[in-house]
Amino acid sequence: MLNQSFYGLLLFIFLAVPPVAHFMESFMVVHMHMQMPILVIAGMLMAKFVQDRFPNFFEKWNGDGVPGALLFFLIVVYWTLPRTMDEALEVPAVEIFKFISLPFLAGIALRDSWEKLKPIGKNSIFIGFIVMYFGMGLLYIISPEQLCNNYLIIDQLTLGWGFVTTAICIVIYMVYNYFVDPSDYI
């Protein structure tokens, strides 16, 4: 697991390098649907290292996985707001917070929570993302006004359709997961 944590750290460092960060933030859809999820994945990869160092903390704080899942979901909701995307580009402290909150709070919390959650908890997260992504997608598509000052309206439309497409993919996954038992194919 040390290799996994090392690769997560390398991924995090790569994403934090200013030219890479600037490039990914120059496209709204890449900023929201690539950079932010990859930061969460980097945190998930680094989580095992942190879990091994502080096992009592995670057992006490996140025993059933619900607090960590809630923390993950709240951080993701915060970063889907148009205002926070703008502030991440304009305010250096908010940019630093993005690079701390997504991997080190959301990613680690999700990794620690996922195996502890019961199926209803996992499905609740998926349903929350479906509702949020459809809502945000419609907001970005239907809004006649520019929601983010740092991006063009065409970027806003592209992001909106990205949200809707992602929500549809999650629905397809949930339907597939309901009807197909993976143990039948082992």
Image: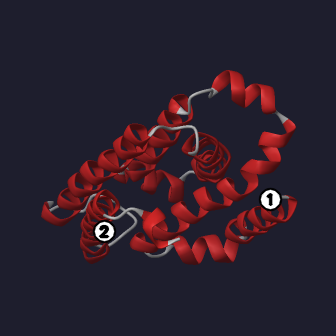
Residue to which mark 1 is pinned: 5
| Image location of residue 61, percent across then percent down | 65, 24
Residue closer to the observer: 186 or 94: 186
| Image location of residue 59, percent across then percent down | 70, 27
Q: Residue at x 29, y 75 (%)?
A: 158
Residue closer to the observer: 114 or 160: 114
Q: Residue at x 47, y 63 (%)?
A: 183
Q: How many marks?
A: 2
* Quadrant of residue 157 within the rendered picture: bottom left
Q: Is residue 108 left or right of residue 69?
A: right
The quadrant of the image that shows the N terminus is: bottom right
Q: Is residue 59 left or right of residue 40?
A: right
* Quadrant of residue 17 within the rendered picture: bottom right
Residue closer to the observer: 13 or 25: 13
Residue to which mark 2 is pinned: 169
* Quadrant of residue 142 within the rendered picture: bottom left
**How many C-alpha atoms fall within 10 Å of the one at disc 1: few (<14), some, or many (≥20)?**
some
Instruction: Calculate the distance from the C-alpha at mark 2 to the C-alpha at mark 1.
Output: 29 Å
Q: Residues at badges 2 and 1 in contact (C-beta under 8 Å)?
A: no
